[in-house]
Image (cartoon, coloured by chain):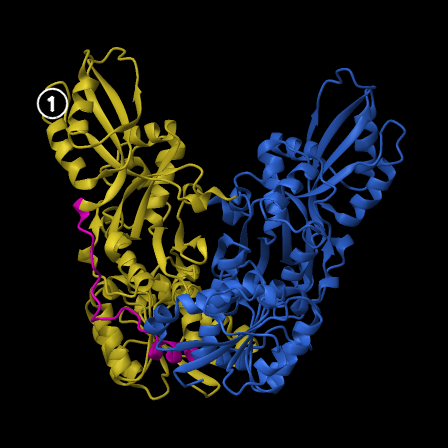
Chain colours: A yellow, B blue
Amino acid sequence: MSKSEIGVTILGCGTVGGGVAALLLQQRKLIRRRTGLDLVLRHVAERDTSKHVVPGAPFCTDAAAAIDDPKTDIVVELIGGTGVAAEFIERALRLGKPVVTANKSLLALRGPELFALAKKNGTCIGFEASCAGGIPIINALVHGLVANRIEALVGIVNGTCNFILTQMTQRGVSYAEALAEAQKAGFAEADPTLDVSGRDAAQKLAILAGLAFNVSVAERDISVSGIDSLQEADLKFAGELGYVIKLLAIAQREKKEKISLRVHPTLVHKGDQLAGVGGSFNAVSVYGHAVGHVLFYGRGAGRTPTASAVVSDVVQIALGVAPLAFKQLNLLPANAKVDLLPFGELSSRYYLRLTARDEPGVLAQVTKVLGAHRISLSAVLQQEAGASRFVPVVITTHLAREGDMQKALSQINRLAALQPPAVCLRIIDAPKEFAGG
Amino acid sequence: MSKSEIGVTILGCGTVGGGVAALLLQQRKLIRRRTGLDLVLRHVAERDTSKHVVPGAPFCTDAAAAIDDPKTDIVVELIGGTGVAAEFIERALRLGKPVVTANKSLLALRGPELFALAKKNGTCIGFEASCAGGIPIINALVHGLVANRIEALVGIVNGTCNFILTQMTQRGVSYAEALAEAQKAGFAEADPTLDVSGRDAAQKLAILAGLAFNVSVAERDISVSGIDSLQEADLKFAGELGYVIKLLAIAQREKKEKISLRVHPTLVHKGDQLAGVGGSFNAVSVYGHAVGHVLFYGRGAGRTPTASAVVSDVVQIALGVAPLAFKQLNLLPANAKVDLLPFGELSSRYYLRLTARDEPGVLAQVTKVLGAHRISLSAVLQQEAGASRFVPVVITTHLAREGDMQKALSQINRLAALQPPAVCLRIIDAPKEFAGG
């Protein structure tokens, strides 16, 4: 794109769409001074006219006509979901018009296919806003870390879950109470399922891992568990052991070039940078063979942070930089499926919380089962029984195979001296790089 | 650059130069797979043949001939300093050959001029490695945050100082002991002056602030004090007050669009993300009007992290992305000098440590002087005298003007009840964005 006046059309004027429209109007002069480009907001297409509220924005209701307008040079899709959003994106790409989107659901479902369509039509897709809001993590993976063989990527990429877990940790409230607070504060939807189930984080991980390892990853490749069944007792015990619990999205290079992909609540050592990421903030740690540990931290959602990422994509497209890179870089290659490590073969440390009868020999029974599955104990936390007939027993283990742990768990859950089910969470240790020599 | 085979010539084979040569040779295949580009190492020009030690690297001693070689497409300057390095960079630019450099001293001294020379010759300069080693902070400022009016940039950008301060904080050792350890561990030069004086951090701040505020900044525009006169007592008292001491490089937008620029030891609240940055790591916090607080963390120096940044620049140049961006973006504009806030007009909170005679009324005398200069107390820490005739009195203040504080200090240092000089450090409070709602 070499002309200095660039027509931008936004599809969808919800929270983010409205934010982008406002930011483009507000910062037109700043962007012109920095880049020499005049970004002109052509259309904001929104079916729901009650959302036509950004002052000075050229609203319309016909998205297709807005895309087709010869004066539309760049299409920004902020409708979300995998339905009409996909149709409009395809329409724009077929016209050779570059698309900017924050639509992680769609990219996790059909990213490689849409990227191929963009290439076929000589255009590109900008998707910085699809992961971790305003944090320029996509640009970092694509450009800044290009010389690195990535060993691992570990992220807090769902602000809703992190807000809830921070409340539970800092104030000792239950999951239900913390969720209600998150909803009240606007950090969680009325139906929070997509967030608290871990699915939203998995969709982002599909995109980030695809970029980090140069493969195509689908959401279904990722083992996912959410935060909705976490109990405050586990956050408390984790704290006593020196950990906080975070919902982590983890992609790691394993033996024989296999990749493990998972999203689950994880015990993170308090000395780890990720442990200090509070509230609705996001952070992504990347480990490259040359760069070592780098971490990117910021607001992972919200109107203006996401708009910041969208407009950065618009500018890079308008400069001609993004189309050139997109054409030459083999992003999310459809023909390179990720070579997954089966979840059962994962190696991890574990946290177990058992509810045991207050009688002698229970711990011995448990350690016998664990030992039979080659799992050894790292620490044990057992308190006096007090009034109850049952006492919590908390165990952490050394590294073990996930498959072994699952087999041990099913035996442990049948022990007469225990009240099933045992709670089992994974522990991630601060890699050496965290130590900060 | 549209050909698929790109000739790269490295000038200087010290720690970083050797790292870049090794990384280019090692990752040629990975980079080809990711980008379609074949980066061929043409020459490694190094006068000192005892440094010709990277296996497989095409060494030579004549840098000028290596630059002039028609098969050299990109020149990587890693000689350092402001002498021959500048001559070679100019030579390459005049031939229209793009230059990649990690040379912060040269850029802080003559950046705007060299950038203009590159533009005049239709080429570009890549300088990601000049600040914060492997952290892609330049790319983030130039591209990722382009839609933001930057309000402030606060960084730990000197790994040597951070290593020393971390040792002093965690182990209570003196500055001299910590420096000796840093030298032993390879984190400090035999002559550490450039690092511990704060000058190295100021050179990086000149570059980062120039990009953040779209102005040209020289090293001499920055008020600098180093860590070489810090006493362990101050790290201890800071800790008791809930702070750690970090050498921060700070650029901030002030009233009437003036910019304040400074490097000094600073009390950082323990809840602040920067407080957790330990050892030789670097981190840069950026506050944008749209994105809010973003932070970038990683290794700020060292062979392979810096090489990671250099090769990322080489790839972006070879892709044609960097030349296009450089041409259109008005980076470090020579004609837009920074509009500096005079240091005396800075507003800050302060930490004072006084050495007071153990007699009544001393604190009253001090607060009277401070009050006369419109400075009010926030906290006081005074311990029992013990055996000594003198007791330390630690005071923190509310916001005050730097000029007022300097005047107050000179009066305080004349009080008969005190042993001069009073120690005065600045406090930076966690901006609201840190709070992590």
Which quadrant holds the N terminus of chain B? Answer: bottom left
For the residue pair B193 and B84, the one nearer the viewer reads as B84
Is A327 magenta? The answer is: yes
Q: Quadrant of residue B349?
A: top right
**Is residue A54 visible in the rendered structure shown here?**
no
Location of residue A65 with respect to A332 vertically, above or below:
below
Q: Which residues are magenta?
A: A317-344
Residue at the outermost front position: B50
Q: Residues within 10 Å of mark 1 (few under 14, many from 20)?
A: some
Q: Nearer the viewer, residue B228 or A66?
A: B228
Towards the viewer: A195 or A224? A224
Identify whether B124 is placed above or below A220: below
Q: Which residue is mark 1?
A: A415
Is-magenta flag for residue B398? no
**What residue appears at the point 48 percent right and 55 percent down from the top-left corner?**
B294
| Quarter where residue A432 is shown | top left
Disc 1 marks a residue whose amino acid type is: Leu
Q: Quadrant of residue A168?
A: top left
Q: Is residue B399 above or below residue B91?
A: above
Q: Report the side of A80 relative to B80 (left or right).
A: left
Q: Position of residue A65 (x, y in %)?
A: 27, 83
Which element type, helix, strand or loop, lies under badge 1?
A: loop
Q: Is residue B216 visible?
A: yes
Which chain is mark 1 on?
A
Q: State the image coordinates of residue B248 (x, y, percent, origin top left).
A: 63, 50
- Number of marks present in the image shown: 1
* Residue drawn at 19 percent across, 32 percent down: A374
Report x, y in % for residue B236: 64, 31
Q: Quadrant of the C terminus of chain B?
A: top left
